[in-house]
Image (cartoon, rainbow, N blue to C red):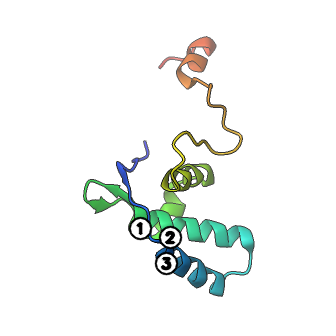
Amino acid sequence: MKTVPDRLTPLSAGRLLGIWRDVAAREDNETVRGLLCNARVLAESCFLGEERLFESAEAVLEELTAGEMETLVRRLAGETDSLPAGVNAGFDPERFRAMRGDRV
């Protein structure tokens, strides 16, 4: 099971701009640039207790899916009820497994 941060600390606008400039200077592909920027932001923003949850942007990319990253970034931006695109908020995995007859 993945560890979930218990605290998200938003970065200053200046720090966000610095991350974007640094990544943009090295990466031309817009999709890759977005993933790398978000990974760096999350590496600096996600905490478990007083410790950073991820030691680096690479650790974020190894641990989280793009959808999980999107959810955390949206929470950092102040969206409280955000889900990644394509996620059904009403889906209940426990109920689904029970209906299929899977053992929980």
Relative height, residue 96 to residue 16 (above, below): above
Task: Give neighbour class at mark 1: few <14, some 14-19, many 20+ (Cα, 10 Å).
Answer: some
Q: Secondary structure at mark 1?
A: helix
Rendered image: mark on residue 75 = none
- Residue under numbered circle 2: 40
In three-dimensional space, the C-alpha distance between marks 3 and 2, rounded to whole angstroms, equals 14 Å
Residue in the picture at 73% in, 72% down: 30
* Contact, mark 3 vs mark 2 (Cβ under 8 Å): no
Identify residue type, mark 2: Arg
**Nearest to the observer: residue 8 or residue 40:** 8
Q: Neighbour class for label 2 at 10 Å: few (<14), some, many (≥20)?
A: many
Q: Quadrant of the N terminus?
A: top left
Q: CA distance from mark 2 to mark 1?
A: 6 Å
Please indicate whether residue 29 sits to the left or right of residue 1 in the image.
right
Labelled pair 2, 1 in contact (Cβ < 8 Å): yes
Per the rendering, the mark at residue 44 is 1
From the top left corner, tell me how far across and down residue 83 is, in percent.
Answer: 60, 42
Label 3 secondary element: helix
Q: Is residue 39 above or below residue 3?
A: below
x 56%, y 65%: residue:
38
Left or right: residue 102 compared with residue 59: right
Mark before the other along the chain sequence, 3 or 2? 3
Q: Are marks 1 and 3 in contact (CB under 8 Å)?
A: no
Q: Nearer the viewer, residue 65 or 16?
A: 16
Query: What is the quadrant of residue 66 in the picture?
Result: bottom right
Q: Which mark is residue 14?
A: 3
The amino acid pointed to by label 1 is Glu
Q: How many marks?
A: 3
Relative to 81, is 68 above or below?
below
Between disc 1 and disc 3, the foreground one is 3
Mark 1 or mark 3: whose residue is earlier in sequence: 3
Callout 2 secondary element: helix
